[in-house]
Image (cartoon, coloured by chain):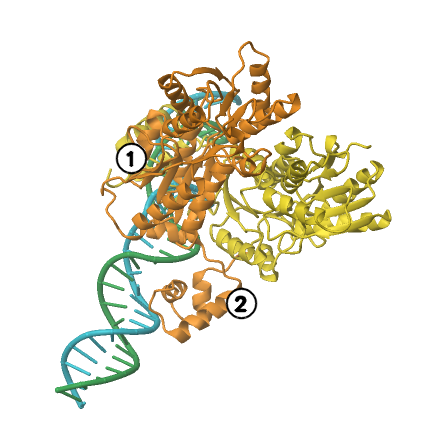
Chain colours: A orange, B yellow, C green, D cyan
Amino acid sequence: MANAPKMSDIAKAAGVSPMTVSRAFKADASVGKKTREKILKIAEEMGYVFDSTASNLRSQKSGFVAATIPSLNNANFADTVRGLNEAMRDKGLQLLLGYTDYNVENEERLIEQLLRRRPEAMVVTGGRHTDRARRLLLNASIPVVETWDLPEDPVGHTVGFSNADAMAQLVEHLHASGARRLAFIGGDDNGDTRGADRRKGFVSKARALGLEYRLVSLGAPPVSMREGARAMAELLDGDTQPDAVLCVSDLAAFGVLTECQRRGIDVPGEMMIAGFGAFDLAEISVPTLTTIDAHAYDIGARTGALLAEILRGDSPQDGAPSIMRIRPTLKVSRSTAAK
Amino acid sequence: MANAPKMSDIAKAAGVSPMTVSRAFKADASVGKKTREKILKIAEEMGYVFDSTASNLRSQKSGFVAATIPSLNNANFADTVRGLNEAMRDKGLQLLLGYTDYNVENEERLIEQLLRRRPEAMVVTGGRHTDRARRLLLNASIPVVETWDLPEDPVGHTVGFSNADAMAQLVEHLHASGARRLAFIGGDDNGDTRGADRRKGFVSKARALGLEYRLVSLGAPPVSMREGARAMAELLDGDTQPDAVLCVSDLAAFGVLTECQRRGIDVPGEMMIAGFGAFDLAEISVPTLTTIDAHAYDIGARTGALLAEILRGDSPQDGAPSIMRIRPTLKVSRSTAAK
DNA sequence: ATAGTTATGGTTACCGGTAACAAACTCCGA
DNA sequence: TCGGAGTTTGTTACCGGTAACCATAACTAT
């Protein structure tokens, strides 16, 4: 298999012009039924593999949609990617993925790299970017979607929610359940802007309700279960004990829960726990964890649907940028049951 | 930003030929220092973005490495992808990812699609493929790596381990810890060939040791915690009770653990539990779970290193296919402590 | 000063498809 | 039988870089 056959080889073998072979591969093109069958048969026999590189160049369409996410090792983002992928698969679009590792400089580099591949659209996680990254996105003149956030000054379209509001909702729930001394774990301003937003939402609502509260920092994202447990240990070894702990993610919350189990602290009797993200873990742990379901899969699916529509219909990209507001759901569970 | 500037535009603005601009972008090319600086400055000002589509076509190098994995929503595969990605990032290679959803027909379609993009190498998860998929891979005349398995008849290179042997090792450990009536959860022959291999390893070792054993099926992969719990409930409601449960993955094992907690069954006192995969969960749950660490990240990292070497050095691809055997580590923990 | 070498830049053609346009063929009714 | 609409196929040029090769300028050694 030294050199792969190309279209012109198929054409020669079939006794037609290369253009006809090209058409035979496009479902909607006008080619005689017999001609097409013959061409496809010969192509399969010769082991022909279509070269989209050449096609992309001439037609100026790559069939790529590029997406940047903070990390793959996170079930939430993985769900979003899955939703995105499924929405695009049947449209013949290929997802081009890159991780930023929760870092806007990485994001900038990544965006630049991805744009070289001439994606037809770009999906980014979050609404904060370097100036140059913004410029790159704007100049690319392709649809851009920011997800998992509601940026103040969107670059293009938005499919997201307010992390602060969602967390505020959780604080209200805990207040209603009888919690009075709260603690929040995570959300340092170290790159995870969504985590930081959640913390802000926590603080302002706790203040508004006149509740005591403490903040505990974790290291750099991604937050792990282990760090949640460590933070909880720190908290419990401190002077004042909270009666409820909110976490930037369910993983940290689970870590908190295990630390309580280790110390024989009853959850929710002596300590309420809530997380964020509606990970599988929250539904199955004992006790089950109260959490916020941000509908990660939907974020991806709706982003995909939006892009498919924009790319299909030659809707002028100057159509008003749409803002799809996802409404996170509070999932109340055992870990915050009222006394 | 109606039409993006191209190299020839930069060339005109800089008063040089397009070829010189092309060279200015390649680090090792011979261009005068002043000329290069001037070109790069102009390019940045004009918002030029390199078009790799054209470059790929002419140079017959895509800079892509394609990989298929069963699912992204799995920390093990995500780790492998991370390792792969990091190993390739600095080599200027882009990862092109696709999911098979644990289905070889999907895999075949995916491989075909990915090959159209003319990747320079292909990484697949597992060693079982449709005949046509095998043919496609062989004809592509690019390096192929099969991972997470040790195929009997490899397509190309291999970076993997024996799932059966690893599980047998775990059975031995449980036997040594005093377990006598075993159960295995998962590993149905429903697409997850690695799971099925683990089950085979379990069965043959349990037989060899003369241990009683039962098998419990789960639904289609991916196995979830919930299904682990359900399977355990089924098992406990049955006639004979095992004294140790082995699971196809840590997630199922954790589900099993929660079911025990719900029923007040002491782990490991009354029931030992072991999983597979060394997920974070195993290290932090109470009790911590005995598991097998397959070194998912390393599989990716070593695959990436192997490919980088092959692609860099123009090593003739007829060099003997290498087989990198990863040695999974048994991580003994509380959940299987001897009585 | 002259030949030989290196550094730098230009020319031409081409990678493998397909857009745009033209042409040939089929089929039908008047 | 002929014109016109619809269908199927062919022709030509081109997408935006760069491989391969050539032409200078600059610099060295003799």
Q: Which quadrant of the figure has residue B23? A: top left
N-terminal of the pair, mark 1 or mark 2, is 2
**Amino acid under disc 1:** Asn
Q: Nearer the viewer, residue B66 or C3?
A: B66
User: Residue B62 location in percent, x, y?
Assistant: 47, 45
Query: Is residue B40 in sight in this rendering?
Result: no
Image quadrant for the N terminus of chain A?
bottom right
Q: Is residue A232 above or below residue B225?
A: above
View extreme (top): residue: A239
Q: Nearer the viewer, residue B19 or B267?
A: B267
Circle 1 residue: A139
Question: What chain does badge 1 belong to?
Answer: A
Residue A45's mark? 2
**Amino acid under disc 2:** Glu
User: Residue B330 location in percent, x, y?
Assistant: 75, 35
View extreme (front): residue: A339
Q: Is residue B100 above or below residue A159?
A: below
Task: Determine whether, in the image, residue B327 is placed left or right of residue A308.
Answer: right
Task: Determine whether, in the image, residue B4 is placed left or right of residue B165.
Answer: left
Q: Are marks 1 and 2 on the same chain?
A: yes
Question: What chain does badge 2 belong to?
Answer: A
User: Residue A137 location in percent, x, y?
Assistant: 33, 34
